[in-house]
Image (cartoon, rainbow, N blue to C red):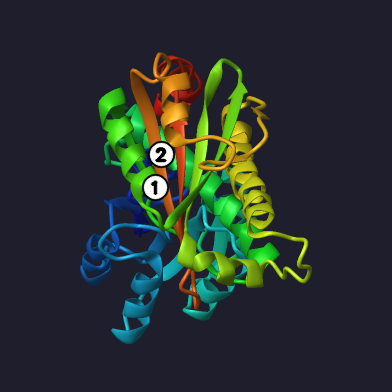
């Protein structure tokens, strides 16, 4: 029986490795890897993607664009989308664009197996025959593993926000970097110096992992956000609305991270910087812990609205070793 050309397309080395390991052991496939949509389309044109496992949020060309191009160019590919963006609207859109099924990250091998069987892509009679796959497993770094952990967490937070606000949340690629305290100070000072920005800060700690979450809003967009939050009382101020929104978004994102690394975070009370505290004070209190900071930046935007806001997660230097231990099983 000829091998089935299978294409795994995801910008994360860790996810490509996970999906390779999640494939049914008896499935006769020849595997090709792609790190973005442009590479995926080229592989499909070359006949290397009869079946495609496709991510949505990728650089250069995302999964939605790949699905649209497959349809527009009349390419033959049976696509299963595997994504951290679990918004109901995201699922609806990919199925409308021709995907056979949608699976959430991190991928459950049994769920993948069932979809392959249900879609007639896997022959049950072949499941006991082991097939070697001549493709090297990608090497996973700490930043790659942590970025994918964040990707899943921010997708869950976006799904909650989408339900609360009744909108579609456009997800970016999360940015994960290490910042020296001077670089962090400059970045936060720039934010403080921008009169158009309002920042909400909330501390968190759990399992020896600690940090501060900052949610940055543009002042001109607060009224639009209040309307989406269905504020119908004059007693419900802009600041109260921002605190409520921050609690939803920061809490959901931290919960998504905690679930994946098996910790429980305790969260402090959110504070509006500039009112209850300033960024300078935040830096002064934390500067001994923030000699080197693991910084995560997620820039959310709401489709159909001129609303953008940034979520910064600033993990203390001491937290990195514990995070590395928690993520070691993903990198191995």
Labelled pair 1, 2 in contact (Cβ < 8 Å): yes
Residue 262 is labelled as: none
Residue 266 lies in quadrant: top right
Can residue 217 be seen?
yes
Give the class, few, some or many, for how many residues have Cα within 10 Å of label 1's Cα (few <14, many ≥20).
some
Task: Give the image location of residue 52, x and y in percent.
Answer: 40, 62
Residue positioned 35% across, 36% down in the render:
144
Q: Earlier in the sequence, mark 1 or mark 2?
A: 1
Residue positioned 29% across, 63% down in the render:
37
21 or 91, nearer to the observer: 91
Give the class, few, some or many, for how many residues have Cα within 10 Å of label 2's Cα (few <14, many ≥20).
some
222, above or below 299, in the image? below
Identify the secondary structure beneath mark 2. strand
Q: Nearer the viewer, mark 1 or mark 2?
A: 2
Residue 174 is labelled as: 1
Residue positioned 26% across, 31% down in the render:
183
Query: Circle 2 is placed at which residue position?
Result: 296
């Amino acid at each position: 029986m000829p091998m089935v050309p299978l294409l795994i397309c995801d910008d994360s080395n860790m996810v490509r490795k996970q999906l390779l390991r999640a494939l049914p052991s008896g499935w006769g496939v020849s595997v090709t890897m792609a790190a973005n949509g442009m590479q995926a389309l080229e592989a499909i044109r070359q006949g290397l993607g009869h079946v495609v496992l496709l991510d949505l949020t990728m650089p250069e060309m995302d999964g939605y664009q790949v699905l649209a191009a497959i349809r527009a160019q009349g390419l033959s590919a049976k696509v299963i989308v595997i994504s951290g963006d679990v918004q109901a609207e995201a699922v609806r859109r990919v199925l409308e664009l021709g995907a056979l099924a949608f699976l959430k990250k991190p991928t459950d091998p049994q769920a993948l197996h069932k979809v392959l069987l249900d879609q007639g892509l896997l022959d049950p009679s072949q499941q006991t025959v082991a097939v070697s796959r001549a493709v090297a497993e990608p090497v996973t770094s700490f930043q790659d593993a942590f970025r994918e952990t964040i990707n899943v967490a921010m997708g869950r937070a976006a799904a909650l926000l989408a339900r609360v606000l009744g909108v579609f949340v456009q997800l970016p690629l999360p940015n994960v970097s290490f910042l020296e305290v001077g670089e962090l100070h400059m970045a936060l000072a720039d934010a403080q110096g921008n009169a158009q920005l309002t920042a909400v800060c909330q501390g968190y700690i759990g399992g020896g992992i600690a940090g501060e979450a900052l949610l940055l809003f543009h002042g001109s967009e607060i009224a639009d956000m209040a309307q989406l939050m269905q504020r119908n009382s004059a007693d419900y101020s802009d600041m109260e609305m921002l605190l409520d929104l921050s609690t939803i978004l920061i809490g959901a994102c931290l919960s998504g991270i905690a679930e994946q690394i098996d910790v429980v975070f305790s969260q402090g009370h959110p504070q509006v910087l500039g009112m209850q505290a300033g960024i300078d004070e935040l830096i002064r209190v934390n500067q001994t812990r923030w000699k080197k900071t693991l910084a995560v930046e997620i820039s959310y935007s709401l489709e159909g609205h001129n609303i953008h806001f940034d979520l910064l997660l600033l993990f203390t230097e001491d937290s990195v070793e514990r995070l590395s231990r928690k993520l070691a099983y993903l990198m191995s």
